[in-house]
Amino acid sequence: EIVLTQSPATLSVSPGERVTLTCRASQSVSSNLAWYQQKPGQAPRLLIYGAFERATGIPARFSGSGSGTEFTLSISSLQSEDFAVYYCQQYSNWPPMYTFGQGTKVEIK
Amino acid sequence: EMQLVESGGGLAQPGGSLRLSCAASEFSFSSYWMNWVRQAPGKGLEWVASIKENGSEKYYVDSVKGRFTISRDNAKKSLSLQMRSLRAEDTAVYFCATKILEPGDAFDIWGRGTMVTVSS
């Protein structure tokens, strides 16, 4: 089973700051990695797929990078609506055995 | 608007059963893999099960194998999750999800979820 480890667990930031979240995989997932945003009481929302491709309708301030075992999600200038929990997910296995990271909470400083 | 709506959650006793449903609308349901993902209270996301477009292949996370069964009715545009031998650790919000818009296998369409509580 591929384990995804996200860091940090919590990030306290001020609006307008740039943030970088990290996701490390226990073995290579190539570029088969996605990032989701989840707000309280809501379903997750896909932000990034294929490690760096923005999903439809996602603002350009969100960007993803990395391949293999190390990935990052960056938010160039944090907006008030960006305070949420962010999860990475790998989908490289076959048969499917999708796994998620434990999440990073981005909170207001 | 493409939509997934879950139903069937509620309170079940340990060892009991519950059947969840997910109704799809505004997309070609029979053309896509479908999935269940759960989230225990205050915890992260966990993939539970996936089913191929025609139902011929089904996959499960180890912790539910032999207890949960995923199925679909393409004519009714409906996905189901039959849960048996429920445990306290199955308590979670259960989401159905699929990949439609984007390349790859990330889930870009999600329902709002249905809450399952396993308690005596």
Image (cartoon, grey):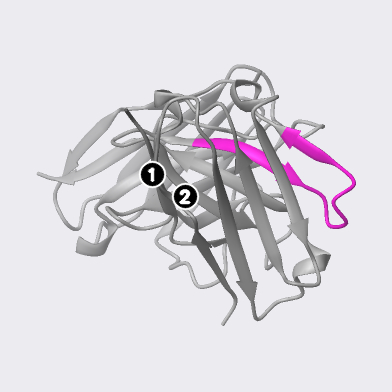
Label for residue B117?
none
Mark closest to the chain's N terminus, 1 or 2 = 2
Give the Cα separation between the discs numbered 1 and 2. 6 Å
Residue at horizontal 28%, vertical 50%? A84
Amino acid at the residue labelled 1: Tyr
Residue at horizontal 44%, vertical 51%? B9
x%, y% of residue B75? 81, 72
What is the span of residues highlighted in magenta in the rendered image? B46-59
Residue at horizontal 74%, vertical 50%? B71
Amino acid at the residue labelled 2: Tyr
Label for residue A36?
2
The residue identified by callout 1 is A86
Residues under numbered marks 1 and 2 in contact, where contact means CB atoms less than 8 Å apart: yes
Sort mark 2 into few (<14), some (14-19) or many (20+) by Cα contacts within 10 Å. many
Q: Splitting the image into 4 quarters, where does residue B77 fall?
A: bottom right
Residue at horizontal 67%, vertical 28%? A68
x%, y% of residue B101? 68, 68
- Residue situated in front as seen by the camera: A55 or B71: B71
Q: How many marks?
A: 2
